[in-house]
Amino acid sequence: MTDGHKETEKPAIAVLGAGKIGEALLSGLLTGGRRADELMFTERHPERAAELTTRYGIRAVDVATAAKEAGVLVVAVKPQDIEPLLDELAPAVDENTLVVSLCAGLPTSLYERRLPAGVPVVRVMPNTPMVVGEAMSAISPGRHASHEHLATVEQVLSTVGMVVRVPESQQDAVTALSGSGPAYFFYLVEAMIDAGILLGLPRAVSEKLIIQSAVGAAAMLAKTGEHPVTLREAVTSPAGTTIMAIRELERHGVRAALLAAIEAARDRSEELGRAHDDEK
């Protein structure tokens, strides 16, 4: 494999696109032990670039410099900006450059078609908790990506959360479930806070009650290893308050609505992927 050789000669990681996710990854890499001189980023807006360089001590460079000096290129631009970026990358990368795509819905085949033959590509679906170091990222190899490439990507992303490997055919489902997932929780928490206000609690009190309950419930799920049903049943006493609430949730079809919502998100992810993959 060329991985060891590549990492010796080009140890740097470049993040192409320094929005919230790109910045979160840079911050996580620094926290995880990477030196600032091993990192670089690209950013279209000079003021934003200067801000990040001041904050982290990391160089802002152009795409050509990033491709020349970095062994790993993390693409974190908006999907609609991918075409001009690939035009810049195509003459500057080869099979010794690992391309990591954080762009929702974009298949590895798009990169493989537009970049030189043999360039390894790994597709990633992260989510926004990356900004607090609690991301859930799913990674999938393209045709030329090896186990070593996947291990490299896992090492990079583990600085900002957890990582799982999935076949690329499952990435649309991952996008619907964990990629969009934080929004579902925020939506639920928003509704529960409003319910507290409806019941007469001050907003600040309602927010504190619900947010800490969400944090505690998530910690129980993560640390006990118990099935959600088991944990829910432990709170649900016969003829008590919780079972009355659960009855209303079931009566209003909340479970069915969640299933339908996640299926709709999956379908939209597939549409976005087809739109880009069909472009020649």
Image (tube, rainbow, N blue to C red):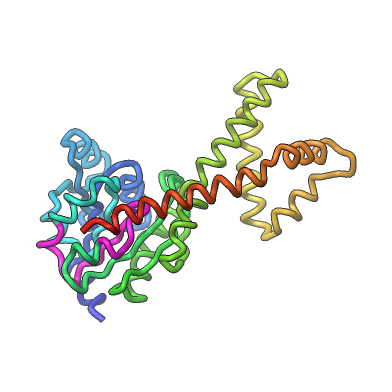
Q: Quadrant of residue 140?
A: bottom left
At x 18%, y 36%, the residue is: 45
Q: Quadrant of residue 188?
A: top right
* Number of numbered markers: 0
Which region is colored magenta?
89-110
Q: Position of residue 261 (x, y in %)?
A: 55, 45
Q: Quadrant of the N terminus?
A: bottom left
Looking at the image, the residue that sits furthest to the right is 239
At x 26%, y 70%, the residue is: 120
Q: Nearer the viewer, residue 38 or 221?
A: 221
Q: Indicate whether 210 appears above or below 37.
A: above
Q: Indicate whether 20 appears above or below 165.
A: above
Q: Quadrant of residue 70?
A: bottom left
Q: Position of residue 273 (x, y in %)?
A: 35, 55
Q: In this image, 179 relative to 22: left or right?
A: right
Q: Indicate whether 119 appears above or below 183.
A: below
At x 21%, y 74%, the residue is: 118
At x 76%, y 55%, the residue is: 230
Q: In this image, 218 relative to 279: left or right?
A: right
Q: Position of residue 162 (x, y in %)?
A: 47, 58
Q: In the rendered structure, does residue 98 fall within the stretch colored magenta?
A: yes
Q: Main secondary structure of the magenta part?
A: loop
Q: Nearer the viewer, residue 217 or 268?
A: 268
Q: Quadrant of the C terminus?
A: bottom left
Q: In this image, 43 relative to 92: left or right?
A: right
Q: In the rendered structure, does residue 194 fall within the stretch colored magenta?
A: no
